[in-house]
Image: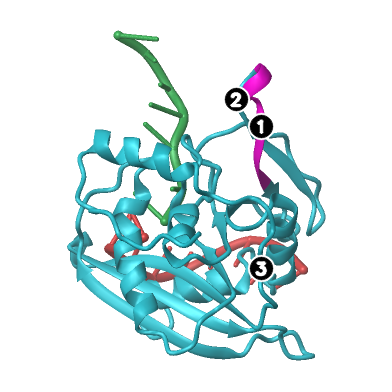
Chain colours: A cyan, B green, C red
Amino acid sequence: MPITSLHDWNLTPDEAIALQQRLAGRIEREDRLDPVRRIAGVDIGFEQAGEITRAAVVVLAWPPAPGGAFEMVEQAVHREPTRMPYIPGLLSFREVPATLAAFERLTTWPELVMVDGQGIAHPRRLGVASHLGLWLDLPTIGVAKSRLCGRHGEPGPERGDWAALVDGWGEHEEVIGAVLRSRRGVKPVFVSPGHRLCLETAVAWVVACLGKTKLPEPTRLADRLASRRDQKRR
DNA sequence: GCGACAG
DNA sequence: ATCTTGTCGC
């Protein structure tokens, strides 16, 4: 059931938390993906000492070419005044509005989206990837570089090895993500379902999109575009 | 009260 | 996230 109306993004922390608790109940964790032909990557960067929020989205063709390279189908960037400071747990209210605007500039639509941040691996099970997934009504996966919440062991050393990220105790204990070794010898990434897919499927897609670096291609390329590292060179 | 804390 | 040069390693 797609969400048809957008809520107010300028909320007090308490109101934002209450809203997250309600929206979390709408997250679908069962696989519901259309045949994948395009995968989008999303990330946010900042300009002018944080005054400007810069949302970047890249759309890559799936599957990648025989050599392993992903074809860049389209890119979009949207800049706007930063609306609120970074508050752990409330990241989506700072980044999702600009991201939605960037998506509106696309002429092609993806069937899957990877977001730089957490999916359900969040205190109220509604990280940026999940929140964005609800608004786009698309399957989303959260790929974060560090942990927000949950406990976990050390994943194995090989690419693809992962350890469960669990949160809660007793009857409330649940697996909320995977601490994935995306490359030998590097700190693992935190993968969690955003919307419309389960953990195993999310991990499989991230692994399938890994190139030669720590981050999967969709997120890595979006990161470069958001931080202007693709042209900013010196 | 004392830590922890995505980007 | 961002401010920033060189440097160690495959």
Q: How many marks?
A: 3
Q: Position of residue A213 (x, y in %)?
A: 65, 69
Q: Which subunit holds the residue at mark 1?
A: A
Q: Is residue A173 visible?
A: yes
Reading the image, the residue beneath label 2 is A168
**Lower sequence index among marks 2 and 1:** 2
Category of crowding for the residue at label 2, using alpha-carbon neighbours closer than 10 angstroms: few (below 14), some (14–19), many (at least 20): some
Q: Is residue A171 magenta?
A: yes
Give the CA distance from mark 2 to mark 1.
Answer: 6 Å
Please name whichever residue, A89 or B1, is drawn nearer the observer in this view of the structure: A89
Relative placement, left or right, of A232 versus A116 is left
Q: Which is more foreground, mark 3 or mark 2?
A: 3
Q: Position of residue A79 (x, y in %)?
A: 25, 74
Image marks 2 and 1: residues in contact by CB distance under 8 Å:
yes
Looking at the picture, which amino acid does disc 2 mark?
Gly
Looking at the picture, which amino acid does disc 3 mark?
Leu
Reading the image, the residue beneath label 1 is A174
Give the CA distance from mark 3 to mark 1.
Answer: 24 Å
Looking at the picture, which amino acid does disc 1 mark?
Glu
Q: Which subunit holds the residue at mark 3?
A: A
Image quarter for residue A219?
bottom right
Q: Say which element carries label 2.
A: loop
Q: Position of residue A20 (x, y in %)?
A: 39, 41
Reading the image, the residue beneath label 3 is A33
